[in-house]
Amino acid sequence: MRALSVVLLTMLLVAPVWAQSVTARNQYKFARTFAERGDWKRALEEIDKAIKEDPHFADAVYLRALCHFGLEQYPEAEKDFKQTIEWNPDFFPAWQQLGNLYLATEQYDQAEKHFKSMMMVPRGAPVAHYCLGVLAYVRKDLSKAEKEWAEAVAADPKMARAHNNLGTLHLMSGRPQQALREFREANDLEKENPLYLVNLAWALADNDQPGMARLRLKEAQEEANERHDVGFTAAALVAYLDKDYEKVVKLSDLALQENKELVQAALLKARALEALDKKSEARLVYEEVLKSDPNIGEAEKALERLPKPEPEKTPETEEAPQTDETPAPEPVEPAPSETPQEK
């Protein structure tokens, strides 16, 4: 799944409605505890008990939708999200998650229609613009994505994720100063988010401020207690600034073991491999980056720059040795090259 379209199942649950039975409420609490740990299977088992006790428990139905979504049981999740919206049309988190489901299942036209309808939901417009920006990004329409995220920020200046995504677009488009401004906004709004600190440090480095970048990376490592992938990426970026490319590769690998879709770590690894003159390995990593996010121009340019792998020779394509006794073989058409196997 592409990096910026990865679905994060945040626990934006309806405020509890205490008209339910004690048993249903307790099962709901157990289920929510499991869900917050990311244990969707156990959460689903518990929430099913709550709904069996009270089929009209709206919070429980929404949580069950999140469980199905987390388990990639999309038809069941869609049904429960729609039921939640039917019971509470103004609950925009359910609207957002249903739209995210359409994104996850690549129903892009349906997602666009859904998010536009979400504009009419109270407090839904900023989030709808944000989601339309994600949709545009997935469709590789970067100017549309920038427009939608700018609209999201205009409607809600405190939306850190929109500022962060605008910063990413500016950085990708060679506008490091604008990127720095947006990353600073995102970091000011969510100082505890280590990924925003890494992005800010990246922009600082691109703006020839390596000293400030190191300070932000130190903060990122301190804040990354629960995000080991980001902590390793921050350390990898420090090593990259130190030009310790072997260390960059090791730390990036650790980050990618934690989160294989973390594009920042993959880019650092690819850059380091190229600096170590391991061009074929670097090319493979850049190819993986583009599979994860086709909008990464750096990876695209690298693939144009780096040599393509030579096709493997087979006995049929190798020329036989020439001797006085051995006549020259007839010309043989080269076998089509195999596509390198993906790791």
Image: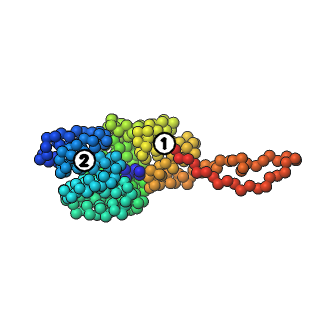
Q: Position of residue 1 (x, y in %)?
A: 41, 51
Secondary element under disc 1, as helix, strand or loop, is helix
**At label 2, which amino acid type do we have?**
Leu
Instruction: Give whichever of discs 2 and 1 has the lower sequence position.
Output: 2
Q: Can I make out residue 200 in this image?
A: no
Residue bearing the label numbered 2: 63
Q: Residue at x 33, y 60 (%)?
A: 111
Question: Disc 2 or disc 1, which is closer to the eye?
Answer: 2
Q: Position of residue 301 (x, y in %)?
A: 52, 54
- Relative placement, left or right, of 1 versus 124 is right
Characterize the local packing of mark 2: few (<14), some (14-19) or many (20 or more) Cα atoms within 10 angstroms.
many
- Residue at the far front: name it: 52
Q: Residue at x 11, y 47 (%)?
A: 19
- Residue at the far left: name it: 19
- Residue 156 image-quadrant placement: bottom left
Above or below, 179 against 231 in this view is below
Residue bearing the label numbered 1: 269
Viewer-proximal residue, 123 or 341? 341
